[in-house]
């Protein structure tokens, strides 16, 4: 009888030890998993912030290149054709429009920054994660350069990031400030849930202000 009791107590002790060990392993796993998720989130945040800043620097570069070429300050391509119609969306940055900007290092490029107007891809201004998102999805080339060329014919690697730039009026109370644009660069990605980084700045024709 005593031997059976000792055996019973030994089995209970073993089960308790296994439970405590499993609990410890589970806790360690959850801690490591949480740490990996936090690291990935921070990495994506850093990449997204840099992508937003890059796009703002690209449009500033265009503005300054226009000054150098004696063009109108908000012309999209300083080396492209001129137009006396300053509401020509093919030539100038206009308020209410959405653009994608990227470096263009191809030998045939007349200017090293490519601008595309993608305003028409937004259908009734629905969420960025809806209709035709692939129009502003970023991919990586073999030289680790971000591009919007994610076509099936290219070897570029798709990333998790989507980026665009929106142009708005600059208003002071009810007055629209001339020779100034509110420029908002936005990067979104969707891993587990929706994330976004957005930075706005005022781009001015400082020679005229």
Image: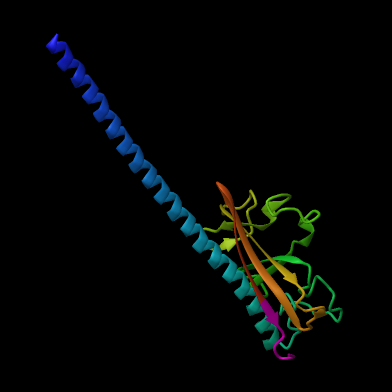
Q: How many marks?
A: 0
Indicate whether residue 39 is drawn in magenta.
Answer: no
Magenta range is 202-209
Q: Quadrant of the C terminus?
A: bottom right
Q: Position of residue 23 (x, y in %)?
A: 32, 35
The front one of 86 and 28 is 28
Residue 95 on image: x %, y %: 78, 72
Residue depicted at x 33% and y 43%: 28
Outermost residue to the right: 85
Q: Is residue 97 above or below residue 122?
A: below
Q: Residue at x 54, y 66 (%)?
A: 49
Above or below — where is 202 with respect to 187?
below
Query: In the picture, residue 86 is in which quadrant?
Result: bottom right
Q: Is residue 185 visible?
A: yes
Residue 144 makes an appearance in the image:
no
State the residue lying farthest toward the left: 2
From what the image shows, is residue 186 above or below residue 9? Answer: below
């Amino acid at each position: 009888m005593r031997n059976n009791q000792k055996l019973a107590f030994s089995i209970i002790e073993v089960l308790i030890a296994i439970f405590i060990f499993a609990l410890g392993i589970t806790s360690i796993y959850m801690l490591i998993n949480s740490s990996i998720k936090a690291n990935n989130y921070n990495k994506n945040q850093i990449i997204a912030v840099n992508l937003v800043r890059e796009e703002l620097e690209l449009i500033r570069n265009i503005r300054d290149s226009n000054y150098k070429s004696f063009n109108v300050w908000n012309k999209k391509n300083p080396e492209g054709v001129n137009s006396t119609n300053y509401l020509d969306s093919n030539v100038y940055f206009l308020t209410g429009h959405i653009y994608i900007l990227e470096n263009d290092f191809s030998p045939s490029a007349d200017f090293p920054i490519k601008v595309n107007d993608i305003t028409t891809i937004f259908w009734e201004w629905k969420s960025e994660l809806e209709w035709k998102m692939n129009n502003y999805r970023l991919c990586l080339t073999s030289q680790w350069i971000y591009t919007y060329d994610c076509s099936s014919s290219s070897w570029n690697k798709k990333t998790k990031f989507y980026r665009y730039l929106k142009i708005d009026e600059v208003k002071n109370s009810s007055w629209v400030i001339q020779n100034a644009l509110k420029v908002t660069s936005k990067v979104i990605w969707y891993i587990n849930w929706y994330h976004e980084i957005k930075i706005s700045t005022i781009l001015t024709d400082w020679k005229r202000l």
